[in-house]
Amino acid sequence: MIDFMRQYDIFSGNAGNLSEMIEKGFRFTHLLALIHSTADKPGVQVVGATALATFAYNNIENQRRIIESGGITFHDLQHLLCSDDPLIRCHAAFQVMSHSNSLI
């Protein structure tokens, strides 16, 4: 939980950090690629989706940027919600909630 809160503090509402990251080559497509990686590696998908959820949480502008970058669908998260691992299910539930306005 501490790592998540650290991520949230770094990115949530801090346009300066995001601008600097974009200047250095960051794109939401990098995280979307992790989500769309092979289904046999849910850990990789969870990391990408959690990072996107952290950017999207209570941030309409970032939600718009994520959609413009290709977006995330409920189908992308559905198998994570059905995982045998309760931690993966928990992360997936947060992701669905964070992306609720921007799921395509």
Image (cartoon, rainbow, N blue to C red):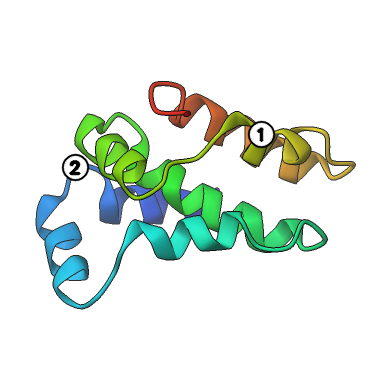
Q: Nearer the viewer, residue 69 or 87?
A: 69
What x and y, as percent, mark residue 71? 43, 41
The kind of residue on which mark 2 rests is Gly
- Which residue is most to the right? 84
What x and y, as percent, mark residue 104? 47, 29
Instruction: Locate residue 34: give its quadrant.
Output: bottom right
Residue 34 horizontal side relative to residue 57, left or right: right
Residue ID at (74%, 41%): 80
SS type, badge 1: helix
Residue 83 seen in render: yes
Q: Give the crowd class for mark 1: few <14, some 14-19, many >=20 residues within 10 Å.
A: few
Q: Earlier in the sequence, mark 2 or mark 1?
A: 2
What x and y, as percent, mark residue 63? 31, 36
SS type, badge 2: loop
Q: Nearer the viewer, residue 2 or 97?
A: 97
Residue ID at (46%, 60%): 31
Q: Give the crowd class for mark 2: few <14, some 14-19, many >=20 residues within 10 Å.
A: some
Name the residue tied to disc 2: 13
Name the residue tied to disc 1: 75
Residue ID at (40%, 60%): 29
Discs 2/1, front? 1
The kind of residue on which mark 1 rests is His
Instruction: Locate residue 16: give its quadrant.
Output: bottom left
Q: Residues under labels 2 and 1: Cα distance?
A: 28 Å
What x and y, as percent, mark residue 102? 39, 28
**From the viewer's perspective, is residue 31 above or below residue 57?**
below
Q: How many marks?
A: 2
